[in-house]
Image (cartoon, grey):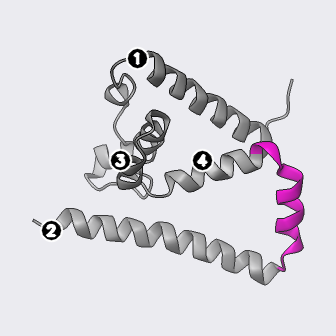
Amino acid sequence: MPRIDGRNLARLFLAGFIFAVILQLISAQNTLTGTLPPCPIRWVSGVPCPGCGMTRALLALARGELGLAFALHPFAYLVLFLAVVFAFIPKQVRSWWFGLSAKQRFWSGVVAITSVLALWFFRLFLDSIP
């Protein structure tokens, strides 16, 4: 049985993305977006989560709708990029990451989390404007 690690998860993600691209190419309609379940956090609380729109943004990327993907969730590009990097050059990523000092890794995490939360708050604020 294959080991489930970051590389295999990234490859599985990319396989699903390629499958979505193929479905979008052979279908004249947007077949996938209409069948997606709603975000459970938004469904229960009425407030979108920080990742709301990511799946639809990735499907928009699969269709080649770059502007729509950015509007739905700007970090979709980053997620796709990181999946490619982790799928194909995981050893280089690991050696680069652990080549950083503990302080640099900590602040990288702080910047990443702050960026996601800042985008989330910004989008919440925009939704509240009439």
Q: Residues within 10 Å of mark 1 (few under 14, many from 20)?
A: few
Give the main secondary structure, helix, strand or loop, of the magenta stretch.
helix
Q: Quadrant of residue 59?
A: top left
The quadrant of the picture occupied by the N terminus is top right
State how far apart marks 1 and 3 are (Cα). 19 Å
| Amino acid on which the number 4 mark rests in the picture | Leu
The quadrant of the picture occupied by the C terminus is bottom left
Residue named by callout 2: 129
| Amino acid on which the number 1 mark rests in the picture | Ser
What numbered label is drawn on residue 104? none
Residue 31 position within the rendered picture, expressed as x and y whole percent measured from the top left: 37, 22
Residue named by callout 4: 80
Q: Tell which tag, 4 or 1, sits nearer the viewer.
A: 1
State how far apart marks 2 and 4 are (Cα). 31 Å
Query: In this picture, is 49 found above or below 64?
Result: below
* Horizontal side of residue 126 vs 109, given as left or right: left
Residue in view at x 83 percent, y 49 percent? 89
